[in-house]
Amino acid sequence: MDAYFYTMRIMYVLVLILMVSCKNETSGNAKVTDEGEKEAVVMPTLEVYDFEGLKPFLKTSSETVYVVNFWATWCAPCIKEMPYFEALNTNYKDKNVEVLLVSLDFPKKYDSHLKPFIKKNKLKSRVVVLNDPDSNTWIPEINPDWSGAIPATLIFSKDKRAFYEQPFTYEELETELQKFIN
């Protein structure tokens, strides 16, 4: 009889600990509103490509000018310049300019770093992910002189192409874009 009560007591303590540890927690995909209700937090979906899938984004026969930025959430200069690409996207969206942000984040960081970054910063530019481990093949195809360092930006139209392995200020970025618009 003593063993039965001892086992029940342990079970009671474990259930109590479990209940207390779960109190007032929400899942990772929910937040609590001011009224105390749970509200779903929708994380962005990601477009993930290997280099063959990304290639169509790197050429055009249209009149659109493309600004393609290669970046990652672990790259401090990339994060610092991100607002400039977002501003460029906003200021030139009606002028035949499209901004594409190509994330080079690691696949295991998509859910923990990349998606929350996109959501937190309310990125309006199109974000795609390049997941192709054969960088020795695709880096020189983007630009033969690219060392692979980021941030890196490709600006192109159907007639002109320029590659920049550097971070930008908004003014510098706009100056380079103007060379394609004028």
Image (cartoon, rainbow, N blue to C red):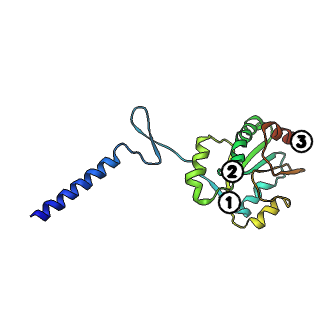
Residue 135 pos. (x, y %): 74, 64
Whole-angstrom CA distance, mark 3 to mark 2, is 27 Å
Q: What label does residue 75 carry, if any?
A: 2
Q: Residue at the location (80% across, 47% down)? A: 66
144 displayed left or right of 148: right
Label 1, label 3: how many angstroms apart (C-alpha)? Answer: 29 Å
Report crowding for label 1: few under 14, some 14 to 19, many 20 or more residues within 10 A (C-alpha).
Answer: some
Residue that extends furthest to the top in the rendered view of this protein? 34
Residue 56 appears anywhere in the view: yes
Q: Closest to the observer: 63 or 165?
A: 165
Disc 3 residue type (three-letter):
Lys
Residue 78 at x, y percent in the picture: 71, 47
Hey, which residue is sitting farthest left in the picture? 1
Q: Is residue 119 above or below residue 47?
A: above
Q: Where does label 1 land, which residue? A: 49
Secondary structure at numbered mark 2 = loop
**Residue closest to the eye, 80 or 104:** 80
The local crowd at label 2, few if under 14, some if 14 to 19, many if 20 or more residues have their Cα within 10 Å, is some
- Along the horizontal axis of the image, is 85 left or right of 33? right
